[in-house]
Image: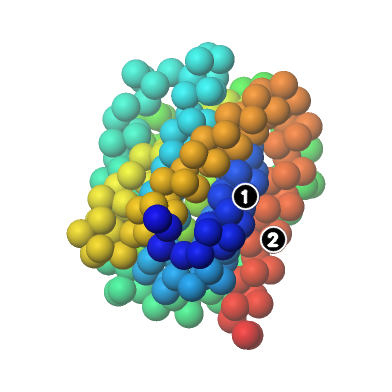
């Protein structure tokens, strides 16, 4: 039934549930699922393709949960989501042009900077702040850059979207989280559409993990909406730092 032994599939499903919970709040779910898939025997392309499949369901679930609660208006964000989808696909197409070794050197520094920003920046709350750029500028600059990065590499995408929404769009932390999940979903779908023709996706494992992602994401989104910035900020710091440490470990392993 599964592409791996049943007991391994069960562990992957548990990893997906945890990833869905964490990712719906602060991003970084791929920090859990991609290593799990690699340990299960997937090659890098299979791991990335399967991760995009199951991650799309988790991000989509979190997006709908935030939308139902009124934290994101899907209709008004369709253009931004379309840009993220196209940029995610473009990033996946050009993945081979950018050496992963270069990104592994740069990204830990950037992720630690993101963690430090959310850890030490005073005044970060669920209240909206002063907007520094117009929505159209944000849509056609920050969104495609971050979504393309998600397509060709991935770790830290949610953190970068969060920082962009808070610093540039002036969103409060909870509102930024809600909009981040919408763009994560769109860039995941764009990337997945590029991966599908490669035949690398583990469909049975991926859909099983997707069901667990849905459950974890629904639970995580409810927790984030109940607690707000008091939960999102520390979890964002932990996930960003964790991703940075993992990338450093990979560079020297």
Callout 2 environment at 10 Å: few (<14), some (14 to 19), or many (20+)?
A: some
Return the residue nearer the eye: 208 or 228: 208
The residue where tag 1 is placed is 14
Instruction: Determine whether, in the image, residue 4 is placed left or right of residue 226.
Output: left
Question: Residue 188: horizontal and vertical position, in percent?
Answer: 38, 47
Decide: is 138 above or below 38. Answer: above
| Residue for point 29% across, 30% down | 79
Question: Residue 101: horizontal and vertical position, in percent?
Answer: 48, 80
Q: Quadrant of residue 36?
A: bottom right
Residue 205 in sight in this render: yes
SS category of the residue bearing label 2? helix
Give the quadrant of the C terminus: bottom right
Decide: is 101 above or below 113. Answer: below
Residue 180 in sight in this render: no
SS category of the residue bearing label 1? helix
Return the residue nearer the eye: 34 or 244: 34
For the rendered model, the colour scheme is: rainbow
| Residue for point 73% across, 40% down | 233
Callout 1 environment at 10 Å: few (<14), some (14 to 19), or many (20+)?
A: some
Question: Residue 25: horizontal and vertical position, in percent?
Answer: 63, 37
Instruction: Determine whether, in the image, residue 208 is placed left or right of residue 148.
Output: right
- Seen as rendered, the residue at the extreme bottom is 252
User: What is the spatial separation of the Cα atoms under label 1 and label 2, in whole angstroms?
Assistant: 19 Å
Question: Residue 17: horizontal and vertical position, in percent?
Answer: 60, 44
Give the quadrant of the N terminus: bottom left
Q: Quadrant of residue 166?
A: top right
Decide: is 93 above or below 83. Answer: below
The residue where tag 2 is placed is 242
Between discs 1 and 2, the one toward the N terminus: 1
């Amino acid at each position: 039934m599964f592409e791996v032994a049943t007991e391994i599939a069960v562990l992957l499903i548990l990893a997906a549930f945890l990833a869905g919970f964490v990712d719906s709040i602060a991003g970084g779910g791929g920090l859990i699922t991609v290593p799990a898939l690699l340990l299960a025997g997937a090659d890098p392309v299979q791991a990335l393709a399967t991760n995009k499949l199951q991650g799309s369901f988790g991000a989509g679930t979190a997006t709908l949960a935030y939308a139902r609660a009124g934290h994101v208006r899907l209709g008004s964000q369709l253009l931004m989501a379309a840009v993220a989808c196209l940029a995610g696909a473009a990033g996946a197409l050009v993945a081979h042009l950018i050496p992963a070794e270069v990104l592994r050197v740069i990204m830990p520094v950037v992720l630690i900077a993101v963690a430090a920003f959310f850890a030490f920046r005073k005044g970060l709350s669920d209240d909206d702040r002063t907007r520094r750029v117009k929505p159209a500028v944000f849509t056609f600059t920050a969104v495609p850059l971050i979504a393309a990065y998600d397509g060709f590499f991935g770790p830290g995408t949610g953190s970068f979207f969060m920082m962009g929404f808070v610093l540039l769009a002036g969103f409060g932390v909870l509102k930024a989280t809600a909009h981040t999940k919408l763009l994560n979903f769109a860039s995941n779908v764009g990337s997945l559409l590029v991966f599908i023709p490669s035949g690398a996706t583990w469909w049975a494992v991926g859909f099983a993990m997707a069901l667990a992602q849905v459950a974890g994401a629904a639970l995580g989104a409810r927790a984030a909406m109940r607690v707000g910035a008091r939960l999102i900020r520390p979890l964002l710091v932990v996930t960003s730092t964790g991703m940075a440490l993992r990338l450093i470990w990979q560079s020297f392993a």
